[in-house]
Image: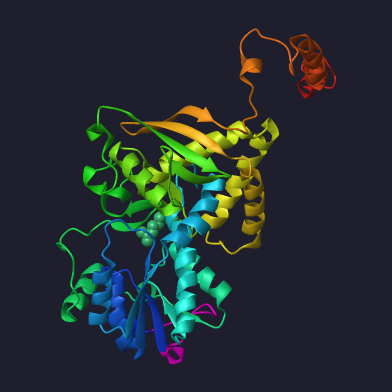
Amino acid sequence: MTDDRHRIRTTASYEAEPSEVGRVLLLYSGGLDTSVMLKWIQEAYDAEVVALTVNLGQPGEDFEVVRGKALNLGAVDCQVVDAREEFARDFVLPAIKANALYGGGYPLFTALGRPLIAKLAVDYARRTGCDTIAHGCTGKGNDQVRIEATIATLAPELKVIAPVRGWQMGRDEEIEYARKHGIPVKGGTEIAPYSIDDNLWGRSSEGRWIEDLAHAPDDDVFQLVTPPERAPDAPQVVQISFRQGVPVALDGEQLSLVELLRQVAEIGASHGVGIVDHIEDRIVGLKVRDIYEVPAAAVIMPAHAELEKLVGTIHQNQFKPGLERQWAYLVYAGLWWEPLRADLDAFMDRVNEQVTGTIGMKLYKGSARVVTRESPNAVYDQSLASFGESGGLFSQQASPGFIELWSLQSRMAYRLRAQLDEPGDELDPRAKS
Ligand code: ARG
């Protein structure tokens, strides 16, 4: 590993020089890249590798198999951490309270997962005496930003290596390296697989035809959500209950947050709900197309937003979306630990103290639509809203006086403009020519 292409160069202060690397904590998924890394780090750095695999609710993953694979490839240890509860409570829940969508469509599941994964890497690196953390991100994505910003923030004493970003192995070379080192390569190698990332809040696919913007989605990309045309003909209404912004019950049954998210995802997916075909502005400059499957978010977020709208005043409802956009952008951009995010959370929590009630969502062939609303805190009075009625807090006789004053400045300004626009007026620049 001494030929020029594999020479290790560093740019940032937190990147490890080869001489600094003795024991490496590797964030290990069990996929090809991190498996090749597991071997390559032992060779290139002559270092010990401790593997860490984080369970964030990736559907269908067998973590015992992943662990066995790491040990087979020479890891001195492989820890599997079940972080589902912490992820749901401390990362997904704040996103729900902030109605967080980046670019109008991406519920941030990956962006929410990375700071937790990196935080756990810091904890385990310290606990197992590692000096360096290794991750499998490429140099083209947002995930490297999220992971390295987290490590540099939480653990200035630890160093980072990102071999996939540094080595210049193409895919074929990686597969050849894998073969040579007895690393099992899943599936056929003729077609590259999609690049997948998933957890209990969603699933993303990138690569292959997805990069061709003119190519409509092939059905084989959807491994979670049933394509809407194949969804059941009968609609289903689900009741989502919230207490202070927290989803607490599904169809009247109290559930833990992790279990509720799992069940809603399953029902939503069966009705074709939560497919997002998204063009995204990455932090590192590129635009990218992602295919997202987000059945839980596509049901829970509109329900939450609807309930919040019902209990909020016109002023609260006008103000919050600007802060939501800022929240989503910070989190997307890898700055989870930025103090502004915590400041914004304090605001979101305060608003959500009122967000208690139940929303009925009708799921049908790809759509999720609000159909019923119920809340003890609704700023709503059916008798006042009903057509033609007057009385109580609302007097229709007061309306004309309100309209006269409400429109006063707008009327004055309108008239001034109309005068300026009249031809022949010397204040009109057009009149000078
Ligand atoms: N584009 C999304 C984001 O930046 C999803 C990234 C998925 N990550 C991955 N390594 N496949 O958050």
Residue in front for this viewpoint, 162 or 98: 98
Q: Is residue 23 above or below residue 183?
A: below
Locate residue 356, reporting x and y percent: 57, 39
Residue in front for this viewpoint, 150 or 250: 250
Whether 20 is among the magenta residues is yes
Q: Is residue 103 above or below residue 374?
A: below
Tell me what residue is drawn at x 29 percent, y 68 percent: 63
Question: Principal SS element in the magenta part?
Answer: loop
Please say whether residue 412 is visible from this viewpoint. yes
Tell me what residue is drawn at x 78 percent, y 24 percent: 429
Quarter of the image holding residue 252?
Answer: top left
Tell me what residue is drawn at x 16 percent, y 64 percent: 189
Q: Is residue 325 above or below residue 391?
A: below
User: Which quadrant does ligand 1 occupy?
Assistant: bottom left
Locate residue 255, reporting x and y percent: 43, 48
Name the residue furthest front: 253
Pick the quarter of the image with the C terminus.
Answer: top right
Locate residue 110, reporting x and y percent: 43, 57
Give the residues drawn in magenta, as a range: 8-22
Pick the quarter of the image with the N terminus.
Answer: bottom left
Residue in front for this viewpoint, 181 or 222: 222
Locate residue 390, reporting x and y percent: 70, 10
Residue in front for this viewpoint, 328 or 265: 265
